[in-house]
Image: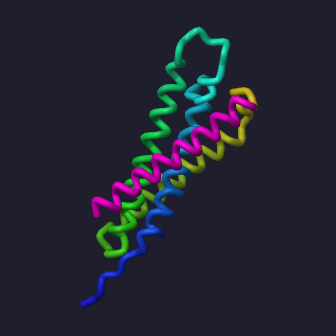
Amino acid sequence: MAETTFFPRRLILGAAVISGVLLALAVHMLGARYGLDLGGLWRSDTHEFIPAGAAIAWWLIATVGFSGGYFTATLMQSAVSGQIPHRMRQFLIAVGVLLLAGAGQAASAPSPIPTVSGVLAGLAALCLGAVMAFCGAHFALRRG
């Protein structure tokens, strides 16, 4: 009978955080392309308290970062023991590649938001994605 091997917790946590951050940044770049940018928080020309696009982008990035970290940690825990079917692995890889390719295409085009606001929005998305991916991975590892 084969012995079950496990990944070290820090390896799973690190990989899940990186995956969650990459997914959060990809969603940030795609969202900025469609008008959902965090840069609306720093604009003074709008008369709204918080623009709706910035609020939606904030929650979308946080949700994707958290769920990306959570599901990556869960999948890595179950992948070692061989509990993930081969077709499911192929599907998840294809979805990840398509999402990151779309984000790369969106990032290569000219930015629709001003430079300083875009840099601040990118840093905010990076920090938010990292914190939420860490929280998602931590909850997945505590549950398992």
Q: How is the image coloured?
A: rainbow
Q: Position of residue 82 (x, y in %)?
A: 32, 74
Task: Give the residue displayed 49% in from the left and 48% down from the top.
Answer: 131
The correct choice, above or below, for 42 with respect to 28 in the image is: above
- The one nearer the camera, 80 or 34, is 80
Residue 31 sits in quarter? top right
Instruction: Name the dominant secondary structure of the magenta segment.
Output: helix
The correct choice, above or below, for 103 with respect to 71 in the image is: above
Spot the residue most to the top.
47
The answer to if 32 sits in the magenta stretch is no
Instruction: Give the quadrant of the C terminus.
Output: bottom left
Q: Position of residue 103 (x, y in %)?
A: 60, 44
Task: Give the residue displayed 43% in from the left and 57% down from the top.
Answer: 92
Residue 2 sits in quarter? bottom left
Task: Give the residue displayed 75% in from the left and 31% down from the top.
Answer: 115
What span is in magenta? 116-144
- The one nearer the camera, 135 or 107, is 135
Q: Is residue 52 left or right of residue 137?
A: right
